[in-house]
Structure formats: C-alpha cells, structure tokens
Amino acid sequence: MFPASSDNYARDMSTPRTPEITLAGGPRRERSDAVRNRNRLLDVAARLVAEHGAGNVTMDQVATAAGVGKGTVFRRFGDRAGLMRALLDHAEKRFQEAFLTGPAPLGPGADPVDRLHAFGAAAIEHRLRYRDLYLAAEQPADQRYSNDPPHDLLARHVATLLVAAGVHGDVDLLTQGLLATLEVPLLHHLSTRRGMPADRLAAGWGDLVDRVTGEG
Amino acid sequence: MFPASSDNYARDMSTPRTPEITLAGGPRRERSDAVRNRNRLLDVAARLVAEHGAGNVTMDQVATAAGVGKGTVFRRFGDRAGLMRALLDHAEKRFQEAFLTGPAPLGPGADPVDRLHAFGAAAIEHRLRYRDLYLAAEQPADQRYSNDPPHDLLARHVATLLVAAGVHGDVDLLTQGLLATLEVPLLHHLSTRRGMPADRLAAGWGDLVDRVTGEG
DNA sequence: ACAGCAAGCGGACCTTGGTCCGCTTCTTCT
DNA sequence: AGAAGAAGCGGACCAAGGTCCGCTTGCTGT
C-alpha cells in the first residue's frame, strides 16, 4: 500500500537507465528529486533523533530541517513509524545478515540449539541498542505483526532452527511465543525499570530455549 | 499520580458519611458530582464502544454524550487508555477472581501444571473476547508494563504456580516470557489474521507450559 | 527542443488527544 | 444558615500526526 521500506543511504543516482521495460504494469523508475529528498530526510531525521531522542522529534521538525514540505515526509514514509523503520533499516539488515550468513555460532554451521542461544543474545543486544527507534517505530496495536517482513524473517529463522533441533509440535506457534519474549517494550521494561542486565535476559532466553528444545 | 481505576457502576451514593478521619493526610471523600459524572461517563462510554467499537470512539464524543466537558473526562481517567482500562475493570476483576478463588482447575485445589493450563485457556478466551478494549487500552510502548497492577497480579500468580510445579531457575524472567505469549496484539494477530482458533492457541500455551515445567 | 504527463511537492487544513485556568459547586466547620 | 476552602468543572487552547489538492518538476517519446 505504501512505498515500503527502501534501502536508502548512498543510492546510486547515476545509472544510465535502460529503456525501462514496463510491461505488466511494472514500477517506473524513481524520480531523482524523490531520491534526493528521501536521502535528505533520512540524514536529517537520523541527526535529529541522535540529538533529541526518537520520541522527541516531530514530523514537522524533520520536514523543516530537511527543507521540504510535511506532505513529502508522509509521502515517502507513510507515517511516523514508517520513518523510524526506515532509520532502523541499516542496522536491521546487518543483524539479519549476521544470523543468516555470518560466522557461527550465530550464522550457519553450528548446532541449531547453539544458534538459537546466539540468536537470542544477539537480538537482545541489538534491540536494546536501538530501543529508542524500535519504541518509536511501533505500530498501532491492532495492526502489529501485520505486514512486518522483519518479524516474519526472524520467525522463519527461529522456526527452521527449532525444526533442525528436532522439536515436534506446533512449531509455528512455539516460534511466535519465543519471539514474543524478545519484544522491545518488554526488554526495555525488564532492562530499564527492573534493572536486569542484558546477560541475564540472554540467559533467560537460553534457559527457555533449552526447555523448549528439551535440552538439560 | 492519577485517581486510578475505581470500581465503577452502581456506586453507593447514599452512605451517611462518618466524620471522615483525615489524619496523616488521608484522602478526602470523593465529591458526589464527581461520582455521578464518572458513572455517567462510564455508561456512555460503554454504550458508544458497543455501538462503534473502541477504536472509533473519540474523547469528545464521550464527553458530549455524557453532557460534561472534555476536561472532566481527562481528569477522571487520565487519558484515553485510562478510560478504556476503566471499562475493562469489571471483566478483569471477574477473571482475576476466577483464578484466585474460583473452582478448580482454574482456581485453587488442582495440580499447579493443570492450573497453568487452565489459566492460559481462560486468559486467551478473556483477552480475545475483550480484545477491542484491550487494544484501545494499550499504553505507549515506552511505558508499557510500568505501573500495571493487573499484569503484576498475573505475574505473581504464574510465578507462584511455576514454583509450585517445581520449576527452578530464573522464575521471574520465565514468567515474563510466558506472559508475553499472551499479549493481546499477538493473540489478535494469530487469531484474526492467521486464522488460528482459540483452542489451538490454548493448546500452544499448554505445550509451552509442559515444556517449561518439564512435563512430557 | 519541446510537448505531454505522471510523479512529486508543499503547506493549508483537519482531527484528536491532552492541557490550562478562571469559574462553580460541594463539603465541612462554626 | 453562612463562610471558607478545596475539589471539580468546562471549554478555549495547543500540539502533532495525517490528509488533500492545486501547482511544479523531472522524464520520456517525438
């Protein structure tokens, strides 16, 4: 429905364009001013967020600081959460690569249960590091998890590892349950308000994984 | 900080008042017009929510329909989520009584693991039934779980049962993990968007509980 | 080079949650 | 009954997210 994520930053603006085969209603190339504006907006937004915290940056501020109209911001990113998601894009992609293709035990090669342990620890660290953006990027309660490709990717990954670890049963549901444990607002609460350090959270995840996979 | 929940509906407005011993800065009795207004607001809000859905009722509508000023609504309930929470109060209290003092296996008397199973099934049913209100009552991501007595009550209950079931380890964290599984937005998503019936969700909870408590 | 046009732009405008503060009403004390 | 003070009230006001639509701009085909 919306332009969707983009993978921003340093987009190649000089490709000499092929005749642009648009058969079957394929998408037209993006206009250059649109690209310029998106990059400007992302730069400016990143700066403002770093300065004032994601929760204290208004869409107007971003638009003004980037020298564009408010409508442009919303056209690009759909809504506030969309802008925040775009800002997370980079970090999230790096995290994804780490468990998809990076070195073991997080990446391929290690025992599935070990990978699950590593996955939890990495996810916790990642999410706590960017909690500010994650909290600001949260969608309204009634559409959370809907159309959330990053979440789906994690789910596929975890489900695969569970199966590889020999877990039987409703793996799909088990996966959603495990991932619910890693939701940012909860991590944030346990970490900040309840004073639990990241390694305790990681140990808790590990314990849960062991119980679910039947280790120990 | 705010007047907090109240237990609304049909409040006794005719008690002849005792001299009201206010030593040590105790709270004054609530003014009668305040009580009247709260009840009016709750009635009206309940009606509007039933008619249009919790997500489609504005604070202005409620105020106007109740014949009070907007400020009054906010003074009573703090914010929109607070009003929704107040509307949930009744149902939530009944649910709490069911597992605290009701008949087994949900209430006391049964095996702790059986009670956990029953608890999950009941929570899932309860939350799906009132999902509309729960979704509208959700707090901003950065303060979720903070000062959430209902959540804390459930947590104590689950933690107690886990201990009674002989679970060792970081029970506190394990409890939070289990409860995360029952968050309304997730249940809503799995139920509505993914088409999972309530008993599948309940079975999934049961499976998770069994794994955690080391049954099967 | 230029015409045609889809894509993009911008900012006025709307909606809604939430705040503020001068005025009113209830309660209590005498 | 009346005075005094606290509690409550209401609606004007503000902030911020999101929409709309007439105008502009970059792209493409000739």
Image: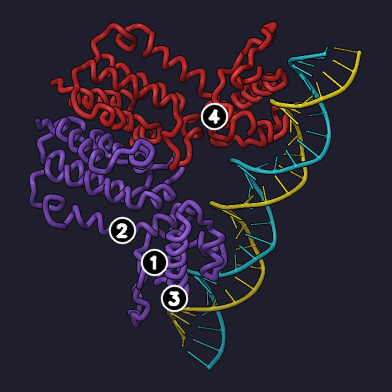
Chain colours: A red, B purple, C yellow, D cyan
Comparing marks 4 and 1, which lies closer to the viewer? Answer: 4
Label 3: which residue?
B32
Disc 4 and disc 1 in contact, CB within 8 angstroms: no
Q: CA distance from mark 4 to mark 1?
A: 44 Å
Q: Indicate the chain on which mark 4 is placed.
A: A
Circle 4 residue:
A84
Indicate which label's residue lies in the foreground, 4 or 3. 4
The kind of secondary structure element at disc 2 is: helix
Q: Is residue A205 left or right of residue A147?
A: left
Earlier-in-chain disc, 1 versus 3: 1
Q: CA distance from mark 2 to mark 1?
A: 27 Å
The front one of A14 and B155 is A14
Looking at the picture, how far across and down is residue B154, in whole percent? Answer: 25, 47
Q: Where's residue B215, x and y in %? A: 10, 32
Residue at (38% x, 8% y) in the render:
A102
* Residue B139, quarter of picture: top left
Tell me the kind of residue under disc 4. Answer: Met
- The label on residue B198 is none
Contact between marks 1 and 3 (CB within 8 A): the answer is: no
Disc number for residue B27: 1
Q: How busy is the neighbourhood of tag 2: few (under 14 within 10 Å), some, or many (20 plus)?
A: few
Q: Which residue is mark 2?
A: B91
Q: Amino acid at mark 3?
A: Ser
Q: Chain of mark 2?
A: B
Q: Nearer the viewer, mark 1 or mark 3?
A: 3
The chain letter under disc 3 is B
Instruction: Give the mark nearest the N terminus, 2 or 3.
Output: 3
Quadrant in which the N terminus of chain B is drawn: bottom left
Q: Are the residues flagged by discs 4 and 2 in contact, CB closer than 8 Å?
A: no
Crowding at dot 4, Cα within 10 Å, few <14 / some 14-19 / many 20+, comes out as: many
